Image (cartoon, rainbow, N blue to C red):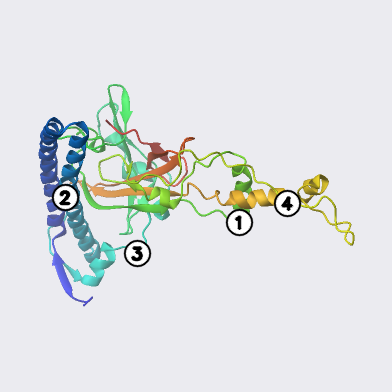
């Protein structure tokens, strides 16, 4: 079955994605207007609390359908991209590409592809040669930042970009649920329009390697005396909800208690004050103060306990879009979302655009209201 031949016109599938995006935009505009009318009616007819509950139950299925339409549109574009890659053609070509199911499937479903493993620095000047914002004539106060690349599942290097626009003196880096007709940060308020997403992937990844045994121990010693942990686990990050064109939010209440106290210092188990008669040189940590100070056992117990927290913050949620425009230019928008906890135990999310492989190759995202 895997050798069965199949055909498609990649350029036409990509064009469908672009046209479907326009339809989705119009549908979103209609839903915004419809929801506003329904909300007014429910609040007026059912009271404040009842109206809020009824409005919430009424809206969710409609907006879920819109998200599903968006996913279908993205998938069609992804299929066009997969045919082009499998057949060695161009994603803008309207020529028929004939290949096998196996070849197309290998591009449609890359195995365990995680973006953090594919960020590259490139040689000096490569990013500017691939995508030089200074040569594109964008509006004053808008443009792109970047320095590196990400290797896509197709093996090509896509320049990593972090868009920004300035509105009323404030800089923004991403949209948060655009209303109909509103300008988008991602196309620099219309001065760089025409980008089409050929593949988008979201998920949770480990963005840094797990610390080794000694590193965990040393980090653990510091963590046990630093107060309550504010880093996140993989399960904490999995509670985030990511949607294209929107700021992330938490879909579930955190498992952590908001009243959780600061972890106490680790207590060395109580031990006898004196060594056994037959073994006078035995040293115990605990009540035997000189022995405890010289043994290092307290540090060992503290380090082992704190090492459990040494790997916190090693996971992020990601959203990566691979895009191209009519001129054949390509770009990648790689968003990471980190989860932390404040002193009250409440979760918060920080979003960044990844622009290169170094830890400081990030642009903190300020979402436009």
Q: Are marks 4 and 3 in contact (CB under 8 Å)?
A: no
Q: Answer few, some or many: residues within 10 Å of disc 4's Cα (few below 14, many 20 plus, some between 14 and 19).
A: some
User: Viewer-nearest of labels 4 and 3?
Assistant: 4
Q: Earlier in the sequence, mark 3 or mark 1?
A: 3
Circle 2 residue? 65
The CA span between labels 4 and 2 is 59 Å
Q: Are marks 3 and 1 in contact (CB under 8 Å)?
A: no
x 43%, y 38%: residue: 346
**Quadrant of the drawing holding the C terminus:** top left
Camera sees residue 89: no
Q: Are marks 4 and 2 in contact (CB under 8 Å)?
A: no
Labelled disc at residue 297? 4
The CA span between labels 4 and 1 is 17 Å
User: Viewer-nearest of labels 3 and 2?
Assistant: 2
Q: Are marks 1 and 2 in contact (CB under 8 Å)?
A: no
Q: Identify the element where label 4 is drawn.
A: helix
Q: Is residue 169 above or below residue 237?
A: above
Q: Is residue 258 above or below residue 255?
A: above
Q: Earlier in the sequence, mark 4 or mark 1?
A: 1
Left/right of residue 348 with respect to residue 24 in the rendered view: right
The CA span between labels 1 and 2 is 47 Å
Circle 1 residue? 213
């Amino acid at each position: 079955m895997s050798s069965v031949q199949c055909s498609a016109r990649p350029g036409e599938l990509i064009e469908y994605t672009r046209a479907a995006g326009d339809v989705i935009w119009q549908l979103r505009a209609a839903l915004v207007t419809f929801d506003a009318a329904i909300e007014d009616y429910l609040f007026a007819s059912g009271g404040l609390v009842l109206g809020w509950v009824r409005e919430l139950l009424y809206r969710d299925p409609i907006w879920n359908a819109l998200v599903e339409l968006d996913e279908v549109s993205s998938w069609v574009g992804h299929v066009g991209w997969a045919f082009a890659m499998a057949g060695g053609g161009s994603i803008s070509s309207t020529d028929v590409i004939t290949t096998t199911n196996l070849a197309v499937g290998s591009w449609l479903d890359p195995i365990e592809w995680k973006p953090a493993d594919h960020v590259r620095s490139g040689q000096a000047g490569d990013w500017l040669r691939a995508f030089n914002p200074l040569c594109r004539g964008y509006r004053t106060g808008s443009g792109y930042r970047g320095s590196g690349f990400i290797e896509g599942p197709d093996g090509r290097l896509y320049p990593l970009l972090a868009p920004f626009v300035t509105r009323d003196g404030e800089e923004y880096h991403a949209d948060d649920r655009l209303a109909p007709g509103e300008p988008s940060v991602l196309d620099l308020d219309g001065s760089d329009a025409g980008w089409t997403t050929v593949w988008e992937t979201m998920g949770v990844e480990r963005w840094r390697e797990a610390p080794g045994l000694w590193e965990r121990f040393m980090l653990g010693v510091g963590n046990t005396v630093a107060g309550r942990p504010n880093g996140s686990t993989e399960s904490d990050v999995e509670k985030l909800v990511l949607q294209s064109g929107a700021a992330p939010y938490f879909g579930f209440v955190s498992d952590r208690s908001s009243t959780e106290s600061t972890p106490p210092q680790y207590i060395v188990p109580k031990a006898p004050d004196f060594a056994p008669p037959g073994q006078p040189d035995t040293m115990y940590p605990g009540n035997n103060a000189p022995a405890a100070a010289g043994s290092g056992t307290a540090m060992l117990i503290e380090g082992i306990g704190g090492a459990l927290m040494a790997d916190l913050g090693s996971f992020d949620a990601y959203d990566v879009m691979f895009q191209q425009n009519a001129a054949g230019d390509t770009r990648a928008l790689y968003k990471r979302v980190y989860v932390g906890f404040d002193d009250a135990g409440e979760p918060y999310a920080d979003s960044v655009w990844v622009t290169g492989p170094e830890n400081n190759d990030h642009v903190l995202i300020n979402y436009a209201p």
